[in-house]
């Protein structure tokens, strides 16, 4: 791509799974899940420029991944094919979230692409239709499209808003390994018959991440990060890993713990958000 795409970026925020239960396995091989999603005020950034001719050009900080396999390109093309849109786009993406970290970076990128190009191409699709398109790209895409902290069931697409969640400061630690989600869900030792949880029980403190034991066995560095962070605050893994997180009493505490982070791990401090930064950008799309 020649030249940078200018203008204000569109955010593709990270998410945390505040708990994750696997309640069954369907005949098609997909797993039935229960989880609670909350956004972070940190994520990737995408810039868009509308072009003529229908082509999708992408400049992205992920070398080695063919454009046809990138969720940003796939989302743009799916939207264009679904609507018959003849316009194209030049897209620049700045990857700020680790790949294989369980923060939903690829799904968030896809959702931001659907939401932004729906506006910039003047398509007028509503959130339900965009979420339906997003589900074809990945189970986590719909929650990013809708932009509200949510209780999720099914494969993650059946969403109930959770506006009552507290919005703490989180410390997120990335233990320098990339976890394969497919590998974890195919592990024969994964617990797949967790008793379903009710929302009031979760809000009272129930719920764990049942993928943690499998990930820790396959990726010992994740277990080390969990143990280290748990010495400071109760810690949990998000999604299928590798990132682990802890809610802190304030930003100062989170940053104080971050300063003690062992090498070669990396981490960041971020505020939990029940309303996605993407929705705020959508309301300010004229800027």
Image: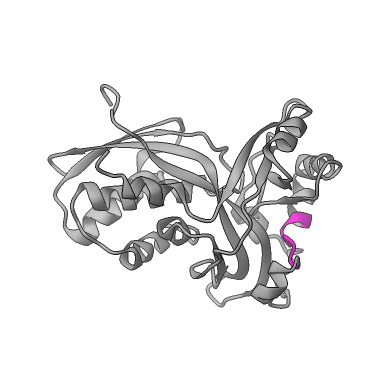
Task: Based on the picture, tell me whether residue 119 belongs to the magenta stretch.
Answer: no
Q: Is residue 117 visible?
A: yes
Residue 182 higher or lower than 271, as above or below: below
Instruction: Tell me how many marks there are.
Output: 0
Colouring method of the image? one colour
Q: List x then y, in percent, for residue 27.
A: 56, 77
82 and 147: which is toward the camera: 147
Secondary structure mostly seen in the magenta stretch: loop
**Viewport quadrant of the N terminus:** top left
Residue 53 higher or lower than 4, as above or below: below
**Viewport quadrant of the C terminus:** top left
Range of residues picked out in magenta:
206-213
Task: Based on the picture, tell me whether residue 209 belongs to the magenta stretch.
Answer: yes
Q: List x then y, in percent, for residue 168.
A: 65, 49
186 and 226: which is toward the camera: 226
Q: List x then y, in percent, for residue 12.
A: 44, 44
Q: At 75% across and 68% down in the image, what residue appears? A: 206
In the image, is 143 to the left or to the right of 214?
left
Residue 96 higher or lower than 107, as above or below: above
Q: Is residue 55 visible?
A: no
């Amino acid at each position: 791509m020649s030249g940078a795409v200018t203008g204000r970026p569109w955010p593709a925020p990270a998410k945390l799974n505040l708990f994750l239960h696997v309640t069954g396995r369907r005949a098609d091989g997909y797993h039935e899940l229960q989880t609670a999603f909350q956004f972070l005020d940190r994520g990737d950034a995408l810039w868009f420029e509308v072009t003529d001719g229908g082509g999708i050009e992408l400049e992205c900080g992920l070398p080695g991944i063919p454009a046809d396999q990138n969720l940003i390109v796939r989302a743009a093309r799916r939207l264009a094919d679904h609507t018959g849109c003849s316009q194209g786009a030049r897209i620049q993406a700045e990857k700020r979230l680790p790949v294989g970290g369980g923060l939903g970076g690829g799904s968030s990128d896809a959702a931001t692409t659907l939401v932004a190009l729906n506006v910039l191409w003047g398509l007028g699709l509503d959130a339900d239709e965009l979420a339906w398109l997003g589900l074809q790209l990945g189970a986590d895409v719909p929650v990013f499209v809708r932009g509200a902290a949510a209780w999720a069931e099914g494969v993650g697409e059946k969403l109930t808003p959770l506006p009552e969640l507290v919005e703490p400061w989180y410390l997120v630690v990335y233990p320098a390994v990339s976890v394969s989600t497919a590998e974890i869900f195919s592990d024969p030792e994964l617990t797949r018959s967790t008793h379903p949880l009710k929302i009031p029980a979760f809000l009272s403190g129930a719920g764990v991440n049942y993928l943690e034991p499998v990930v820790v066995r396959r990726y010992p560095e994740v277990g080390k990060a969990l143990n280290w962070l748990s010495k400071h605050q109760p810690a949990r893994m998000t999604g299928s890993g590798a990132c682990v997180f802890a809610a802190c009493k304030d930003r100062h505490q989170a940053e104080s713990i971050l300063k003690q982070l062992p090498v070669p791990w990396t981490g960041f401090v971020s505020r939990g958000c029940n309303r996605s930064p993407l929705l705020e950008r959508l309301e300010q799309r004229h800027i």
